[in-house]
Image: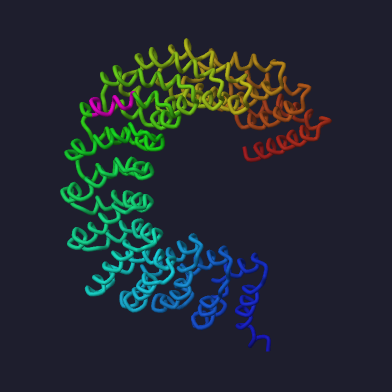
Amino acid sequence: MAMIDEPLYPIAVLIDELKNDDIQLRLNSIRRLSTIARALGEERTRKELIPFLSENNDDDDEVLLAMAEELGVFIPYVGGLEYANVLLPPLETLCTVEETCVRDKAVESLCRIGSQMREQDVVEHFIPLVKRLAAGEWFTARVSSCGLFHVAYPSAPEALKTELRTIYRQLCQDDMPMVRRSAATNLGKFAATVEAAHLKSEIMSIFEELTQDDQDSVRLLAVEGCGALGKLLEPQDCVAHILPVIVNFSQDKSWRVRYMVANQLYELCEAVGPEPTRSDVVPAYVRLLRDNEAEVRIAAAGKVTKICRILNPELAIQHILPCVKELSSDSSQHVRSALATVIMGMAPILGKDATIEQLLPIFLSLLKDEFPDVRLNIISKLDQVNQVIGIDLLSQSLLPAIVELAEDRHWRVRLAIIEYIPLLASQLGVGFFDDKLGALCMQWLKDKVYSIRDAAANNVKRLAEEFGPDWAMQHIVPQVLEMINNPHYLYRMTILQAISLLAPVMGSEITCSQLLPVVINASKDRVPNIKFNVAKVLQSLIPIVDQSVVEKSIRPCLVELSEDPDVDVRFFATQALQSKDQVMMSG
């Protein structure tokens, strides 16, 4: 009897759990849908499970979202592509719910299923679904339908294609702004599937209507589609239809629309080609760089290097540079920060002379900005300038500012400088480095902030790799080892970390003669944290030094630490001894 009832069991449990008051139980059963479907088999899944889900009127968005997601990958469980259409009804219902994220997920799942369905099934089942949603009484259905046209359209016969284009136009003129917004958002995807002849006539007129919408949120999304539409059109059509719209939008009364224009402008420049960019886009772009809304200036400033790349250097110097100078002293720190992120990229475009004359003063003023993020963004891109103007000039003009920043009160700025030091060192060479930056590297090992000390220890290792063990032995190791006597235990810990990082770079001989004695000595420290860090360092040194040294120096020290009163010291010492035995055995 139990055997006969077995197949009924999963659906019964599912039904019970889906009706349970506990949302977690309902969620769990939805997330196990694929397991239940496998247990039921394809036919019963089609005939019992899917109809049950279609009728399930759970009102919790989380459960509905999980269901919309699960159904998107359900084709194999209902018997493959020929039965894919049975999944459409429950998803169609989910497309009409109030919660946006559920509708979006249902649309995503429908697109996934529709794009796999056979052509005749799309015509028989998918396109009628799109038409039903588009004619839905409640706006949520119409909003969802907009996201499905690009899947339905390619499979439709000619007459249906015309009907779908007409329906889409109606959605773009819907009374509800939410529907028009959705239509504007999906226009680019739909346009990509429409034939070229209809693209120019119908889609472009739909686009023009959307750009004149009285709701700024609709116009905003129409702008967002400009780049995608521009790529579908020939450059001359793009100049005729899209360029005027964008130029017009750069003066839109809503700052959100202007912000969108600033974001999309580069894609449009690519679509229209260099000539129209120079004559029409540059004035619009200059307007955006001088916009009275900081958000618009931020978006425009972030694109300055990309736009300059399309223009020739003369135009960039003539039109864009004056705006860049203004932006470098903008009242909004976020505008200056956005500019600092990209301005270094202008150096290769403008060439050496213009960079020295025009850009260097701007770099310097941004390096001295009161806002740490601005300084940070400049520092992290210095190598781009170095390639253009050479290290001599860079070091004369920018290095004093870098030294100043190395002692910046904001630790993140100090951190950025440290991370940049090895690159600077390789560019400046040993001689210059020793003079100007060597002392700083030691100073950071005693910083108040742990992240700085940690980065400084890594920095010491990277410098040793860059300039070699001999240089490190002269310039780094003595100063580092001297600091092991610092009265503060946190600084002593940093030195132990630096030693463990330096040892692999310095090699066995220097490790045995210089580094190991310092570590062994530190094992007699009165602070337990130092002692267990000694155990960790000794463990890392075992593979580097000879076996005789391990037996003679490291092992006795670890044995002594393994009998320490402190439990953590004993633990790490014992761990190190065990790893020593493993190394010896494998060796």
Is 439 inside the magenta-drawn segment? no
Is 318 inside the magenta-drawn segment? yes
Q: Nearer the viewer, residue 562 or 155?
A: 155
| Outermost top residue | 435
Relative placement, left or right, of 475 versus 204 is right
Expressed as whole percent of the image width and height from the top left, the position of residue 533 reads 70, 29
Q: Main secondary structure of the magenta part?
A: helix
Q: Nearer the viewer, residue 426 or 110?
A: 110
Relative placement, left or right, of 533 versus 354 is right
| Outermost right residue | 565
Q: Quadrant of the C terminus?
A: top right
Residue drawn at the location 24% of the way across and 60% of the way down: 203
> Is residue 494 depicted above or below 233 in this figure?
above
Count the marks. 0
Magenta residues, start to end: 316-325
Relative placement, left or right, of 404 versus 253 is right
Residue drawn at the location 63% of the way across and 83% of the way down: 6
